[in-house]
Amino acid sequence: DTAVSQTPKYLVTQMGNDKSIKCEQNLGHDTMYWYKQDSKKFLKIMFSYNNKELIINETVPNRFSPKSPDKAHLNLHINSLELGDSAVYFCASSQGPSGFYEQYFGPGTRLTVT
Amino acid sequence: AQSVTQPDIHITVSEGASLELRCNYSYGATPYLFWYVQSPGQGLQLLLKYFSGDTLVQGIKGFEAEFKRSQSSFNLRKPSVHWSDAAEYFCAVGAKNTGNQFYFGTGTSLTVIP
């Protein structure tokens, strides 16, 4: 059973479109995250939710909107896609919001904006 | 502010040779420390973690890491590298309080030559 899953794995779209990425974890964790990994492999945290509550909201364009319908799911909606949004987006989860807990990562969604 | 530095962007080693990947952190107290590995096209997988106690920690796939408080380092080692170890390696620091829990280093890319 996949612990943290993301769909889709690949997403190719044109500038100006709106797209969503979905994430689900079956680990029973309370906390979920979205990360962006650029072409240089740098990982940047975007958002974090704990029990469906937003607890981390880094400096990210407001075209990015996360949504957590329940603590097992965290989706990422992106409006008006731009070329610079091309990256790999990772979802992760952890038992709790403290840095004590290791994070479990999904396989990533490679977004390409043309 | 917390930060993680991985001084080596890229390392090449021969199969069977020993490996050491460097990680230095900046944190006001004893941090939680992690090493993750990212194989090509995959998500991040936890190799090992340090919270307290014995400063030499063992992880999966034959990896170990040593916490040295005096040097603010948490270097990853493996006595004999296998070709399958070729991947991107990330060091991470977990903050003790809630908030921005994880700080990832910029990663070290490992190439293994036969």
Image (cartoon, rainbow, N blue to C red):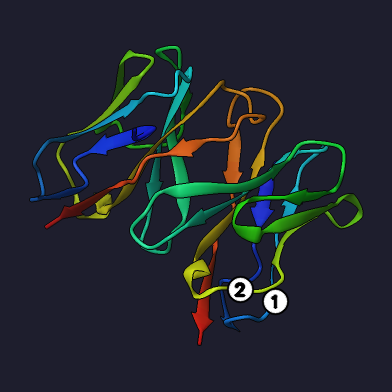
Q: Quadrant of residue A63?
A: top left
Q: Name the kind of residue labelled 1 in the image.
A: Ser
The label shown at residue B18 is 1
Chain label for disc 1: B
Q: Quadrant of the C terminus of chain A?
A: bottom left
Q: Quadrant of residue B50?
A: top right
Q: Position of residue A102 (x, y in %)?
A: 58, 35
CA distance separating discs 2 and 1:
6 Å
Residue under the point 69% across and 24% down? B97
Q: Is residue A8 above or below residue B59?
A: above
**Circles 2 and 1 in contact, beta carbons < 8 Å:** yes
Chain label for disc 2: B
Q: Nearer the viewer, residue A12 or A60?
A: A12
Residue at the limit of the structure toward the right, as seen here? B70
Instruction: Mark 2 or mark 1: name the one nearer the start of the chain.
Output: 1
The label shown at residue B3 is none
Q: Kindly tell me whether residue B106 is visible in this rendering.
A: no
Q: Which residue does the numbered mark 2 point to in the structure image?
A: B81
Q: Is residue A42 above or below residue B28?
A: below
Dot 1 falls on a residue whose secondary structure is loop
Q: Name the kind of residue labelled 2 in the image.
A: Val
Q: Kindly tell me whether residue A84 is visible in this rendering.
A: yes
Q: Position of residue A85 (x, y in %)?
A: 26, 49
Q: Position of residue A89 (x, y in %)?
A: 33, 45
